[in-house]
Image (spheres, rainbow, N blue to C red):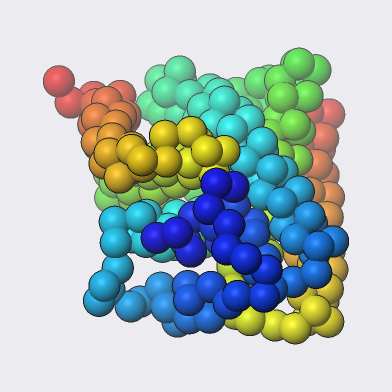
């Protein structure tokens, strides 16, 4: 909450709306982080509803769930699962950065924090992939 | 950049003070639920995907796992915090489309209904499975 424009003054970013997300020209790294946060959030919400729909099969009994497990254990599907975990990591770590910056902590280092969040996501997804695929 | 940070902080420029306060409250709720989610989602992913041989629980393992009252309570808390965070985020994105005060009220009502329905369905799945344990 450290950067607040005077009341009555329209923020250029807000005026652009969602269409402004695709505008790359003149966008700073912080703007990229903002769009990344929203896009990953939307994709995770999409997955949430897919996940909830699939979990309905659990209520139908063991046979229904077993047929889904066969699909889930497919290596290609596990690859998609790794992509999902990467999306969650980027969203979560970038979100923690936004909490800090929005609270006035580390505002001057926010770009470095975003790059750190991306680097940490890469390291964590590599660790998760080792656990998921058993690659050593 | 400044505009982006302020938007994330829930600052509704040009709006009346009560609307600005609501935006700030929404941001605080979003930040608090997001921070809690890092912990709860971590527990959920590790418990469901990394501690079981083969990566996923079979039917009997899921039912047995949810039969524990402590696990059921943690999963229910996870559902509430996750849906709360998701609906606040969805609302923020929809508000970016630039609706008037009336449209914003409708969006808030719609995401509230969607969130309540999603939570209701999730609780039904969880309690149905827990009861079979």
Q: Residue at image x 45%, y 18%?
A: B51
Quadrant of the snapshot with the N terminus of chain B:
bottom left
Residue sitting nearer the eye, A25 or B42: A25
Please provide percent x and percent y for residue B32.
66, 36
Please provide percent x and percent y for residue B124.
82, 44
Q: Residue at image x 42%, y 78%?
A: A20
Q: Is residue B63 visible?
A: yes
Q: Report whether A132 appears left or right of A107.
A: left
Residue furthest front as drawn:
A6
Residue furthest left as drawn:
A136
Q: Residue at image x 83%, y 82%?
A: B102
Please provide percent x and percent y for residue B58.
54, 30
Q: Report whether A59 appears left or right of A121.
A: right
Quadrant of the snapshot with the C terminus of chain B:
top right
Numbered disc total: 0
Q: Report whether B64 appears left or right of A36.
A: right
Q: Report whether A5 appears left or right of A117.
A: right
Residue sitting nearer the eye, A15 or A45: A15
Q: Residue at image x 42%, y 34%?
A: A106
Residue sitting nearer the eye, A39 or B53: A39
Please provide percent x and percent y for residue A47.
52, 55
Q: Is residue A74 visible?
A: no
Above or below, comparing residue A87 to residue A13 in the picture: above
Above or below, comparing residue A36 to residue A123 in the picture: below
Residue sitting nearer the eye, B74 or A59: B74
């Amino acid at each position: 909450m450290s950067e607040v424009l005077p009341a009555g003054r329209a923020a250029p970013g807000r005026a652009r709306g969602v269409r402004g997300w695709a505008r790359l020209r003149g966008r700073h790294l912080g703007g990229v982080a903002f769009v990344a946060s929203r896009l990953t959030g939307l994709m995770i919400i999409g997955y949430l509803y897919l996940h909830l729909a699939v979990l309905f099969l659990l209520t139908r009994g063991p046979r229904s769930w077993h047929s889904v497990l066969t699909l889930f254990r497919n290596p290609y599907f596990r690859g998609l699962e790794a992509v999902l975990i990467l999306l969650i990591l980027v969203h979560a770590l970038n979100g923690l950065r936004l909490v800090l910056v929005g609270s006035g902590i580390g505002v001057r280092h926010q770009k470095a924090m975003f790059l750190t969040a991306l680097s940490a996501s890469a390291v964590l997804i590599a660790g998760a992939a080792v656990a998921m695929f058993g690659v050593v | 950049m400044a505009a982006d940070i302020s938007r994330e902080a829930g600052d509704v420029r040009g709006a009346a003070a009560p609307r600005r306060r609501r935006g700030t409250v929404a941001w605080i709720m979003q930040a608090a639920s997001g921070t809690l989610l890092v912990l709860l989602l971590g527990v959920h992913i590790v418990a469901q995907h990394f501690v079981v041989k083969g990566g996923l629980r079979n039917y009997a393992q899921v039912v047995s796992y949810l039969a524990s009252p402590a696990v059921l309570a943690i999963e229910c808390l996870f559902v509430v915090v996750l849906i709360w965070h998701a609906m606040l985020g969805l609302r923020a994105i929809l508000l970016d489309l630039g609706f008037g005060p009336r449209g914003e009220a409708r969006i808030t009502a719609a995401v509230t209904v969607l969130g309540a329905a999603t939570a209701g369905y999730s609780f039904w799945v969880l309690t149905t499975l827990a009861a079979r344990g």
